[in-house]
Image (cartoon, rainbow, N blue to C red):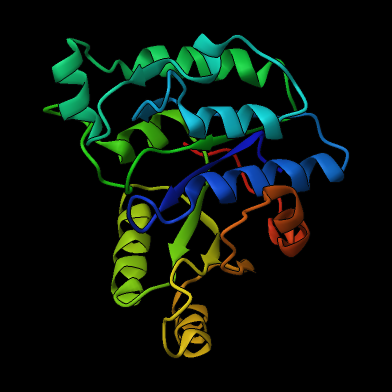
Amino acid sequence: MPAGYFVTGTDTAVGKTLTSCALLYAFARAGKTVIGMKPIAAGCENGQWMDVERLVEASNVSAAREWINPYALVPPMAPHIAAEQTGLVIDITAIQQAFQVLQQMAEMVIVEGVGGFLVPLDDRYDSSDLARALKLPVILTVGLRLGCLNHALLTARAIHASGLTLAGWVANQIDPYMECQAENIRALQQRLDCPLLGVLPFNEQIEAKEYAELLDISQLIPLPNQT
């Protein structure tokens, strides 16, 4: 099994952090030492980056924040715009170095992306370049709502075009009023060439530890190292 996975989503606010934390708890239950990484976080609430806080809580290995979250951007917007407004340049090499440190500390590193798979990081690079630099198989979080079929299939195509492995996907019920959820899930199962790891039901009181029981990580078969 790879030493980590890159978690992306069909859009922003579709549950990447929830999926990442549930995966951390699931791998921990399987006896792994685990740590979550959020290379780029945009949006600060009361002096905290909540995605990072949740990943830290779900990890069973501790590490310095500069390794877990190399770039903490205050404005809640696209990372390249937030970085520009903050006067920073996002350096993928620096993120690679932080990831390598975390790999030495835990058996499994779950890396949560920022925004969608192709969100820009600067004038040249986007999130797909980051995933490729880390050489990790990808787990796709699909936010179940109207339009998710197109978003999921386009994202899967982008992942494959990047030369990366789509290892699995998670369905997250972000819209409790969505019609024909089961039919949408079935359509994606027929079209995505990777296993559905689990369906996360809508719950305003989200508990990632409980959701870990809904993920079948045994479907994440051993994969060759990404190149």
Above or below, comparing residue 10 to residue 61 in the picture:
below
Residue at image coords 56%, 59%: 204
Give the x, y percent position of residue 92: 34, 20
Give the x, y percent position of residue 227: 46, 36
Quadrant of the frame with the N terminus: top right
Give the x, y percent position of residue 6: 51, 41
Say which quarter of the image contains residue 122.
Answer: top left
* Left or right side of 170 for 59: right
Residue at image coords 66%, 33%: 3
Residue at image coords 29%, 73%: 150
* Left or right side of 120 for 222: right
* Left or right side of 67 for 85: left
Say which quarter of the image contains residue 200.
Answer: bottom right
Above or below, comparing residue 109 to residue 171 in the picture:
above
Above or below, comparing residue 36 to residue 28 in the picture:
above
Say which quarter of the image contains residue 81.
Answer: top left
